[in-house]
Amino acid sequence: MKEELVFLVNELRKLSSEVEWLEFKHNKYRPDMVGEDISALANGAAIVDKDCAYMIWGIDDESHEVVGTDLDFRALKKGNQELIDWLRVMLSKNADFHVDDCSVDGKKVIILTINKALNTPVTFSNIAYIRSGGNTKKLKDFPALEVRLWMQLNTKNLEDAAIAENLSLNDVFAKLNVSAYFTSLGISQPSTFEGASHYLIQDGLIKQQDNGLYSVTNLGALLLAYRFSSFRTLYRKALRVVQYAGDNKMKILRDQIFDEGYVLCFNDVLRYISGLLPSEERLDGAALKAVSPFSLDVVREALANALIHQQLNITGTSVVVEIFSNRIEITNPGAPLVDIKRIVDNPPKTRNEKLSSMMRRMKFCEELGSGWDRIVLECENIQSPAPRIDVYIESTRVVIFGKIPYSDMKNGERLWSCYLHSCLMFLSGKFLTNQSLRERFGLETNSAASISRLIRQAMSKNLIKPFDPDSSHKFMKYVPYWA
């Protein structure tokens, strides 16, 4: 570890001058100054998209010669409080740093490593700072830099952030199932760690650090981790499947956590869910066949959507699949990015673009088609209610139903299914009609009157509207309210 720190210091000394993410000092120290500099360097690193910034004591700030320092950073205090603890209180919650020391040319050097700002600028005492001309200034006094910083923060996210640092390639390959990466992409794996690491770096799964070692990103760990529990903040992102005895949560039958990256466990999770789904035996030719009222294709698509669209910076929660006797609920952290009434026709939008892209490229959701239109179509094929979408402050829940007779459906389920049927028909260049809606619910002609009542109710709720209001009632066609 000390050798790596020496290598890092010597590499940083080679820079011609101090930059936005680096500052050298001799013995200069003041608690407020350190806090302001941490804010400035974290924000500077974010602007230029560096994973880390550094404040190093024991290096001359002009010549970059090693001069050593007398500071004992861990023993420093602000009043009666240890400096490090005080800094963590005064800095914003997204500030992250750690302190190391080493001997360079026989002289003591202290390295303060500061992670770049994520989501919002790092502040000290509620004020954001930035480096300009070798000095630390208030960010608000530099509007152009503030705009650049926010542009970076709005386009960079937790997918790119390092979750494990200072790893050798041996360590990386011990934490990530690299073979699964190459197998999923359908390309040959290079015979050396160095050759394989090139691909992982290009896809943002790992990064090479300034000290020559490597870090694993959240993206790499989410997809390929042998064990989520081996990463300090990722263990709560593991997929969880819970089965209950009935239609409520009074009694848990099974509770399984899948502690692997999503690429490694996705199909295992689906097989596990399939084995838990209620089923009945039906005669198929001369043999009995177990048939479930639930569509595994719908579960597959909804689960993939939950993984792709989860909000990664909401801690302490993961994607959860809950299986009841009459429904399946899939919950993910984060509210939807689109109006749920436009869930079928809206262009795809995700807060985790790299995670989504890699999942598609690695083909473990290749068969899922085009999202919610496939979900709705599959539900229509098995004549089940369209999945309900419940939106909460920090989570989204999709409730999947099995095949239910129209007479047993709740009125809200009928209306939601009617509306999504109109969306699906419109996107196919067709129209919702009394006949198409009867076929969607598996009803005969003698149910036309009840379907007409449902259509009138859907219009009164402003879910659908007539395509041509002047058409005769018998030939009336309908489109979604937004068409």
Image (tube, rainbow, N blue to C red):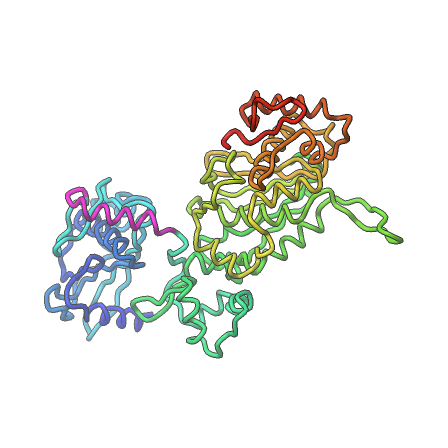
In the picture, measured across the screen, residue 424 lies left or right of residue 9, that is right
In the picture, measured across the screen, residue 15 lies left or right of residue 230, that is left
The residue that appears at 51% across and 60% down in the rendered structure is 361
Asked if 357 appears above or below 448 in the picture, the reply is below
Residue with the most extreme left position: 62
Percent position (x, y) of residue 334?
47, 41
The residue that appears at 57% across and 22% down in the rendered structure is 470
Q: Hey, which quadrant is residue 439 in on the image?
A: top right
Q: Hey, which quadrant is residue 138 in on the image?
A: top left
Q: Quadrant of the N terminus?
A: bottom left
283 and 322: which is toward the camera? 283
Q: Main secondary structure of the magenta part?
A: helix
54 and 307: which is toward the camera? 307
Percent position (x, y) of residue 291?
77, 47
Asked if 442 appears above or below 235 in the picture, the reply is above
The residue that appears at 31% across and 55% down in the rendered structure is 115
Percent position (x, y) of residue 415?
62, 28
Residue with the most extreme right position: 286
In the picture, measured across the screen, residue 262 lies left or right of residue 231, that is right
Residue with the most extreme bottom position: 191
The residue that appears at 40% across and 66% down in the rendered structure is 202
Percent position (x, y) of residue 268?
63, 57
Asked if 411 appears above or below 153 in the picture, the reply is above
235 and 477: which is toward the camera? 477
Residue extent of the magenta highlight: 140-157
Tell me, yes or no, whether the highlighted magenta stretch contains residue 165. no
Total marks shown come to 0
Tell me, yes or no, whether the highlighted magenta stretch contains residue 151. yes
